[in-house]
Image (tube, rainbow, N blue to C red):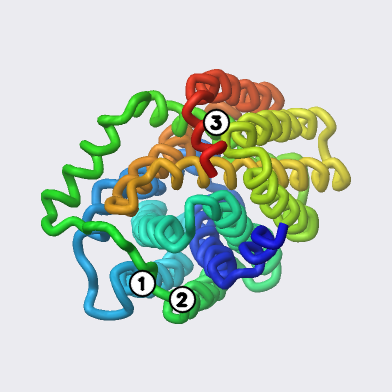
Amino acid sequence: MTAMLRSLLSGRMLVALLMGFSSGLPLLLTGSVLQAWMTEENVDLGTIGLFALVGLPYTLKFLWAPLVDRYSLPFFGRRRGWLVMVQLLLMASIAALGWTQPAASPLVVALAAWLLTFFSASQDIVIDAYRREALSDRELGLGASFYVNGYRVGMLLASGGGLILADLVGFPLVYQLMALTMLVGIVTTVLAPEPDIHTTLPTSLQQAVVQPFAEYFRRPDAMLILLFILLYKVGDTMASHMTTPFYLQLGFSKTEIGAVVKLFGFWATIIGSILGGILILRTGIYRALWGFGILQAVSTAGFAALAQIGYSLPWLAGVIAFENLSAGMGTAAFVAFMASLTNKKFTATQYALLSSLMGVPRVIVAAPTGYLAEWLGWTVFFAACALLAVPGLVLLRRFRPWLQRQDDAQ
């Protein structure tokens, strides 16, 4: 218990929390916030769904991650130097997206959104590597929960706070304010210590590109692990991509959505992330992935229930709270699982490979969700998303022997 308290109160967890916030803030600025802006500008649902493709950098970030492992910038250290530079560029790209016009120039909006996701994905590469190198193996689960906690708070600020502010000051100014909020991440990076790595680092770009993939694919079940990462959150992610148009079509105002997300979703995220981290420490990653995966599927089914009930603020609050609770717990276990698979010599590249697959549902699979929702109707669409959790959970049983040995060793 004393060791757990020391970990909970350590500066490493505070850094994980704040870096998570910096990672989570940009995500929904090209997701639900941009969707709401485009819906308000009378852009059709099909186009809104296709805008998921601007998130391709999240799925391709492993292509340039070796540069982060191989090269260091001449300021702030190996990890923090890259992070400061990328965060400054990300801040500028958020502001630039706010200057676009969704109805008049959708291609310009798409280009600005793509630049935002490119720098956001680059920030994720460095933050994921930093967290893996700064935390011990035993702290990965708890650190992941703090990271996810901050990540979800950043998402909630952008979505809930952004939608409320949009009713008051309009979407362009919202993006300028969110750009300024990125200063939290920049200050954290400058003040955080550089991780101390006791391993041989790549000495050439060839080593940084080839060896991480060769080392990973020599492992048993390497391809099945990638398939599991692709499947584990696919239904949850597809459902989440269309929730904002869903709420608006049910008759909820932007202020109502923002207020419920902020008041109920925020506290559900805090509780879920902390509880998830503690449960991972106590039960291990394998049991956590199972339990939290089931909760994610049930929370997705809640959207189908809301579609049948219609406009109801209490039901909206319940659905959003449960979804944030289960998603926070599931993502904490998922992030800890991926971090445990990386070799510290190639942290940035291997983690980028794994987390890129985690982003595929958000980008590729989510792209046609607008058309699917129009074709199936909201109830059947969300019920189908809930059932998509089953293949990932079935595949998880394959990993039980070595995951439980890994949990027992810690």
Crowding at dot 3, Cα within 10 Å, few <14 / some 14-19 / many 20+, comes out as some
Q: Residue 265's x, y, as percent?
A: 74, 53
Marks 2, 3: nearer the viewer: 3
**Foreground pick, 391 / 225:** 225
Q: Amino acid at mark 3?
A: Gln
**Foreground pick, 270 / 381:** 270
Crowding at dot 2, Cα within 10 Å, few <14 / some 14-19 / many 20+, comes out as some
Q: Amino acid at mark 1?
A: Arg
In the figure, 55 relative to 123: above or below? above
- Identify the disc placed on residue 404: 3
Crowding at dot 1, Cα within 10 Å, few <14 / some 14-19 / many 20+, comes out as many
**Foreground pick, 291 / 311:** 291
Marks 1, 3: nearer the viewer: 3
Quadrant for the N terminus, please: bottom right
* 330 sits left or right of 355 in the view: right
In the figure, 31 relative to 172: above or below? above
Of pointers 1 and 3, the one earlier in the residue sequence:
1
Q: Amino acid at mark 2?
A: Ala
Of pointers 2 and 1, the one earlier in the residue sequence:
1
- Give the residue at mark 1: 80
- Give the residue at mark 2: 192
User: CB of mark 2 within 8 Å of CB of mark 1?
Assistant: yes
Residue 261 visible in the picture? no
Residue 275 visible in the picture? yes
Which residue is depicted at the point 49% across and 60% down? 23
Q: Quadrant of residue 319?
A: top right
Which residue is depicted at the point 54% across and 44% down? 410
Report how far apart the C-alphas of labels 1 and 3 lie in the structure: 34 Å
Report how far apart the C-alphas of labels 2 and 1 lie in the structure: 8 Å
Q: Judging from the image, what secondary structure is the residue with disc 3 in? A: helix
User: CB of mark 2 within 8 Å of CB of mark 3?
Assistant: no
